[in-house]
Each structure stands twice: as structure tokens, then as C-alpha cells.
Image (cartoon, helix red, strand yellow):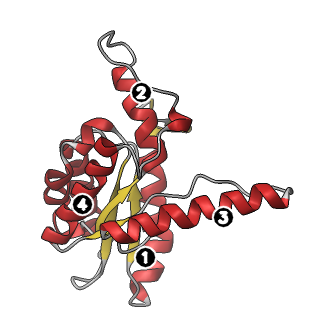
Amino acid sequence: HLDEPEVRIDGSAVPAAILGTSLTLFHAGRAQMERGQGVYFYLPKLESAEEVGFWREFFNFSFKYLSFPDDGVLRAIPLVESLPLAYQMEESLHALGPYAAGLNAARWDFKASVLEFIMADSRSVWPDRFEIDIKTTEFLANIFRRLVAICLKRGAVPIGGMATALPSKDPEVNKVAAESIRSDKEWEAEQGFLRG
């Protein structure tokens, strides 16, 4: 969603995600493939299975263009951090095809996305997002339980969200933050998330 203004092709700026992924594959990816290691990516900010499908085409082209070995491992994990993508999680795994490794429950950004999509709707009311807890807000919890079910059904890895509690110089704040993180990760494990 951001252009790389310093790099232009035929006068047009190159999307930063494409440039970054290309350079990673060309340099580090090639070296890792030569050592028999896999190359792995997170795919952020996607809103549809169609966008996820773009990356399958991109990886197919890259595999051929860079002459990666047929048995080379290249995998990606879409971050479910937008409301529209939550409705297309299974389709996203299908769209990514052989490159699909799993789905990531990007909980904090997902809450912000819900706000973005409903804020203009006068029929919708949303409380302060800092008061919304994934563990106790059923419709959010159910979305991510569904993510786990889809991944397990399709042989993919359901990955938990990033902890949002931040460290502090105040030991009491750290104690509360650590408990919050532990509680989140225990909840994720109970739901079937394999990593977090």
C-alpha cells in the first residue's frame, strides 16, 4: 500500500511490498535456497483472497525467474488483520496454494480495522478499543476460533497474535503486562493456536 519513491519503472514508483519481497528473494532467498533452507514471509494488510492470490502468482514467477530448485521451500502466512479478510480466510489459504503455511491472528490491528469499517455506519456502536478483550468479546473470539478451525482443517498453522503489552521501567507495570501476555497466550493455546 506504500510506494518506494526512490525506485521507478517506466516512470512509476514501485510498491514497497513488491520491491522488498523481490530484493529479499533475490539476495537472502537465493542464499537460503542454496543452503537448502526455506524462505518465509508474512503477508500484511491484505483485504481479500484475490489480493492473497496475487502473491501466489508473484511467488510462481519468482521461483522460475530466480531458478530456485524444484524442491525449494517458499511459504507465506497472511496476517488476518482486516475485517474483509476475516470473511475469506479459507479462500485465502486456497488462493495462496502451495505457498500457504498458515494464518496469523493479528488481533490488535484487526480491532482497528473493525473500527475503520464500521465508524461511518451510524447503526454501529463500538466501545473504546482498549476495553475490548479478545478473550471476552465473543464475536472477536469466534473469528479467531474460526481461524484455528480453518487452519487445522487445511493442514496450515494457526499463529496467535502479537502481545500488545509493552515493557516499562516501572516493575509494577511490567508485572501487569506480563500477566496480560500470559493470559492472552494461555487463551490462544486453549483455542488451538499452535504458535504465538
Q: Position of residue 8 (x, y in %)?
A: 48, 37
Amino acid, disc 1: Arg
Helix, strand or loop status at disc 4: helix
- Tell me which numbered mark, 1 or 2, is placed earlier along the sequence: 1
Q: Say above or below: 57 vs 45.
A: below
Label 3 or label 2, whichever lies nearer to me, is: 3
Circles 1 and 2: CB atoms closer than 8 Å: no
Taking the image as shown, residue 181 lies to the left or right of residue 93, namely right
- Which of the 4 image quarters holds residue 148? bottom left
Taking the image as shown, residue 153 lies to the left or right of residue 186, namely left
Residue at the disc numbered 3 = 178
The N terminus lies in quadrant: top left
Residue at the disc numbered 4 = 61
- Tell me which numbered mark, 4 or 3, is placed earlier along the sequence: 4
Q: CA distance from mark 1 to mark 2?
A: 40 Å
Residue at the disc numbered 1 = 30
Amino acid, disc 4: Phe
Helix, strand or loop status at disc 2: helix
Label 1 or label 2, whichever lies nearer to me, is: 2
- Tell me which numbered mark, 2 or 4, is placed earlier along the sequence: 4
Q: Position of residue 79 (x, y in %)?
A: 37, 53
